[in-house]
Image: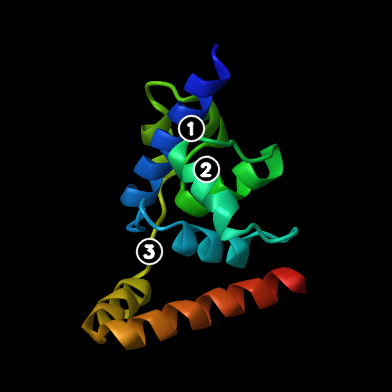
């Protein structure tokens, strides 16, 4: 397959996965920031994120796995495409996510906050997740 077509296909799937996860497919700054929060290796630049979004580059396998896990899609689908990739990614390998009633109430409470406080709560939760991974 033509490398240019491969990069463009990856870009389209990345943008689709970002939209499905309620992130902007038009912001390399947001992509770089959110990716770097989750990636344990060397951070990417905004320029690298832009190249992924416009189809000029495909990330390494390690970065691809981080993107796929973050966005809830199979890494194989994100890299190569396929018909049922999105459906498989929605449920993941362990089946659909199950929420307890306390989790649903917490999400409802989060939605009642103004945009600024929602962002603070999300960043706090991400910080806790990063801290727990380091243990």
Question: Splitting the image into 4 quarters, where does residue 127 fall?
Answer: bottom right
Say which residue appears at 34% left-offset and 88% top-offset: 117
The residue lying furthest to the left in this view is 112
Whether tag 1 and tag 2 are in contact, CB under 8 A, the answer is yes
The residue under label 2 is: 52
**x, y percent for residue 99:** 37, 63
Give the Cα distance between marks 1 and 3. 31 Å
**x, y percent for residue 114:** 25, 86
Residue 94 seen in render: no
Give the Cα distance between marks 1 and 2. 8 Å
Foreground disc of the pair 1, 3: 1
Foreground disc of the pair 3, 2: 2
Query: For numbered disc 2, what is the local secondary structure?
Result: helix
Pick the residue in front: 92 or 1.
1
The residue under label 3 is: 99
**Dot 1 crowding, Cα within 10 Å, few <14, some 14–19, many 20+:** many
- In primary-sequence order, the first of circles 1 and 3 is 1
- In primary-sequence order, the first of circles 3 and 2 is 2
**x, y percent for residue 27:** 40, 58
Pick the residue in front: 36 or 27.
27
Give the Cα distance between marks 3 and 2. 33 Å
Foreground disc of the pair 1, 2: 2
Say which residue appears at 74% left-offset and 59% top-offset: 42
The residue under label 1 is: 10
Say which residue appears at 53% left-offset and 44% top-offset: 51
**x, y percent for residue 36:** 61, 63
Query: For numbered disc 1, what is the local secondary structure?
Result: helix
Is residue 45 rendered to the left or right of residue 23? right
Is residue 26 rendered to the left or right of residue 64? left
Say which residue appears at 51% left-offset and 37% top-offset: 74
- In primary-sequence order, the first of circles 1 and 2 is 1
């Amino acid at each position: 397959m033509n490398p240019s077509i491969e990069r463009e296909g990856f870009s389209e799937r990345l943008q689709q996965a970002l939209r499905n996860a309620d992130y902007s497919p038009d912001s390399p700054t947001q992509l770089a920031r959110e990716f770097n929060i989750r990636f344990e290796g060397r951070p990417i630049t905004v320029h690298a994120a832009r190249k992924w979004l416009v189809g000029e580059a495909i990330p390494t396998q390690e970065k691809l796995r981080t993107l796929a896990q973050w966005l809830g899609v199979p890494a194989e689908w994100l890299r190569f495409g396929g018909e049922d990739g999105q459906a498989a990614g929605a449920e993941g390998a362990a089946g659909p996510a199950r929420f307890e009633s306390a989790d649903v109430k917490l999400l409802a409470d989060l939605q009642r906050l103004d945009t600024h406080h929602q962002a603070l709560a999300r960043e706090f939760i991400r910080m806790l997740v990063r801290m727990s991974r380091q243990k």
